[in-house]
Each structure stands twice: as structure tokens, then as C-alpha cells.
Amino acid sequence: MRDGGAAEDGTSVDAEQPTRPLARLRKHWLLTSAVALAVLATATAVPVVLADSGDEPRCQEIPASTRALAKDPAAATRALDPGDELTLFGAVRDLLVHENPCGDGAEVLGRVVEAATRAPDGKPHTLAQARGAYAVVAAFDDTEVPAGLAPGLARLLAEYVVDANRYLSPDDEAYTPAADATSAAPDDTGWTTYGRFLAPGEAHADFEHAQPYSSVGADPEALMAELAKDPEAFAILYDAQRAYLAYYLERLTRAGADPDHHPEPDKDGTPRPADTWVDIDLEHLTDRVGTLMNLRARYAREGTIPDLAAFDRVVQQHTRGTYRAATRQLSSRPPMGDIAERQVSGPVAGDLMDGRHQLFTVLDAWAKARNVPPERASDLRQLIDDRYVRALWMTF
């Protein structure tokens, strides 16, 4: 577990301590051609075990060379780094995307993803790791995730929760799949498009990047929707958002504003508000929680989740606990990967699947402990209420 976060008494330890399915191959000669092309394209070609009869593959064996990457983070990062121009993206996709991996293959691929993109405790993400995170999300665009791989991909989104949450849509000004620490650093006013409270020296995956004249694009929201079908992955994603809320609130001023933002005044000399982007960040966070609950309800109606009570029990089993913000303002700027791994404050209280209640509980406790002005506390509560209901009822 990473250092930092809330302790059992509700205080926090400063973080400075530490749907389309894949098209199936219909003829054996096509399958043979595909395998031959994979051999030419990458040294990690996947052997395919053919069925005794019929035209469909039974499963795909994960080669030993790929399995070895799960235990060698440096090699895994090199293997999943697509480069600034995404020239190696095809090799990354070929390594990771398999319709039906044999045996424990899907779990192995999840461990490879973690090894390649996860920063050690207390360490910032490197540029290569952040590019790899982009490539992984892009590789599973509009692709079904095989059973066993979803938790590993969910841990990736949790590891990059700040970058995944600020994603809106492809942006022509997102020039590369990741930004180095210099590019992501705040300007003279304390503002940066990459988010608030960024760790110095950390690279960031830029999921808004869209390669011109190419179909390559990374959409963390679409991947989240696919992963939410798996109860363990659902728990990981939900935990990450609730941990991020506590992390975010405990760094705000008593007025609920960004302490690092010092905007220039308007022409009439009136200071511009320092809480605009705070509100937007909290809206995006609330959107993710509301969307998770929306997906849960939709999948239950459609039969994708055949037994909702059983699904919820598994989610509960994999939920780490509840996260409360510190009772004092923190000034630390820990690496992004430490956010979702913060210590829990205790067990979950109330209905875990009432996302609005879980968010309100943390917000209200923070506002009371920090003596936040009632008007600002009320505005934040209304903001969360509005965005949660909007996401919960939005039609996909």
C-alpha cells in the first residue's frame, strides 16, 4: 500500500510521508495469415490454439516472453511505450489485445499493464509510463475485455485518476500521448490544463490526444464503461473516485478554493474567482461516480449483470473502505499514483451503492471540520447533487 492518506481516526497522514466484439476470423487460411503477419510485426506473436472442428479459434496462448514482462517493469514499460508519434502502437495492441487468452492469460496481461505503467510508491510517473498508459487505453478502444483482465485495466485508470478524470474529448491541441513535467507544470498564475495539485516532476497521460489522419484514440470513459461489467473492476474504479475526493478536498482552502491559483485581476481590478476549476474538477469526479451507478443499473436491466445482489456482494468484498479528508489543509503534492492507494479511514458506512450519499458524507464532514462558509459548502453540495443526478439518468 502507498503511504499517505486518512488514518483510522479520520485524520490524514501527509502524503509526503510515505461495444463491439472483436471480429472473429472465419477461415483457417485467414487465421494463418493473421498469425504470420503478427510474427512479422512483433517478436511477441501469440500462438493460436485451433479448435478441432469449426472455424473459430479456441484460445490464444500468451507466450513466455510476454509473461516475463509482468516481473520486469522496465522491460514492460519499453514494450508498451508507443513513442511520441505512436509509431509502435500496433505492436502494443498486438501484445495486449486477445479475444480469448488461454488459462490465466488475461490475468497475466493485467499484470503486464501494471508493471509497465505503475510508478513505485512515492515516485512520479515517467514519460514512458504515461505514454504506455495512453497506449493501453487506446488499445482497448471499442474492444471487449476478456474475463480476468478487467481488474488490471481498472487499476491503470485508478493509477492515472487525475488524467482520466480531466478527459473531455479529443483535442487538436493535445500534441502527444503524454506530457512531460515541464509541459504539465502550472504557469505563473498557478493554472495548468492538467489539473490541480500536481506532483513536481511527474509526466501525465494526455488522453485527449488524437493522432491526425488515424483511428488511434484513447477514451478512458468508454473503457470505464466496459470495465464496470466486472464487480472487482467496479470496486477499484469506485474506490479511486472516493479516494480522489478526499485527497482533493483536503488540499483546498477553507473557502473551498485552489490555494495554488493566483489569477490576474480583470480589467476593472476585480479578482477572478479561484474556485472555477475546483468546481469543474469536482463535477468531473461526480460524473464518474454517477456514471458507474448508471452503468450498474443499465447492465442489470439488460441482463449483462444477471444477479445484481451477487454483483454488489463482490463489489463490497473488493471495496477497501471509506475515505475521509484530513481535518487540516495539506500542502503536499504527492505523485498521482498514490491517490487511489491512500489509507482508508474505516469501513464503509451506509449503502455503498448510494453514490450520492457516499460523496455527501465526505463533503459534509470536511466542511464541518474546516469550518467552510455555509454558502460555499451549500454550493458544493448542490454541485455534487446536480451532476450526480445528471450522470445517473443520462442515456448512453
Image: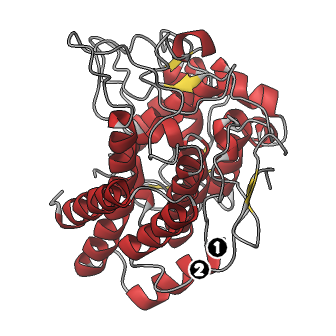
Looking at the rendered image, the quarter that the N terminus falls into is bottom right
Q: Position of residue 243 (x, y in %)?
A: 58, 57
Q: Is residue 389 left or right of residue 31?
A: left
* Residue 224 as seen in the image, left or right of residue 69: left
Residue 55 seen: no
- Residue 173 image label: none
For residue 347, say whether it is visible. Answer: yes
Indicate the quadrant where residue 232 lies. Answer: bottom right
| Closer to us: 366 or 177 | 366
Q: Amino acid at mark 1?
A: Gly
Quadrant in which the C terminus appears: bottom left
Residue at position x 28%, y 50% from top?
20
Q: Closest to the observer: 147 or 168? A: 168
Q: At 32% across and 22% down in the image, what residue appears?
A: 271
Q: Is residue 307 above or below residue 132?
A: below
Mark 1–mark 2 Cα distance, whole angstroms, equals 5 Å
Give percent across and percent down for residue 386: 22, 60
Secondary element type, mark 1: loop
Q: Are marks 1 and 2 in contact (CB under 8 Å)?
A: yes
**Residue 320, x across and y down, in percent:** 66, 71
Q: Which residue is mark 1?
A: 321
Q: Is residue 3 left or right of residue 186?
A: right
Residue at 39% of width from left, 18% of height from top? 263
**The residue positioned farthest toward the left in the image shown:** 395
Q: Is residue 335 above or below residue 294?
A: above
Question: Could you tell whether 19 is left or right of 264 in the image?
Answer: left
Disc 2 on helix, strand or loop?
loop
Q: Which mark is residue 348?
A: 2
Kind of residue sitting beneath label 2: Val
Give the residue at the far front of this rendering: 269
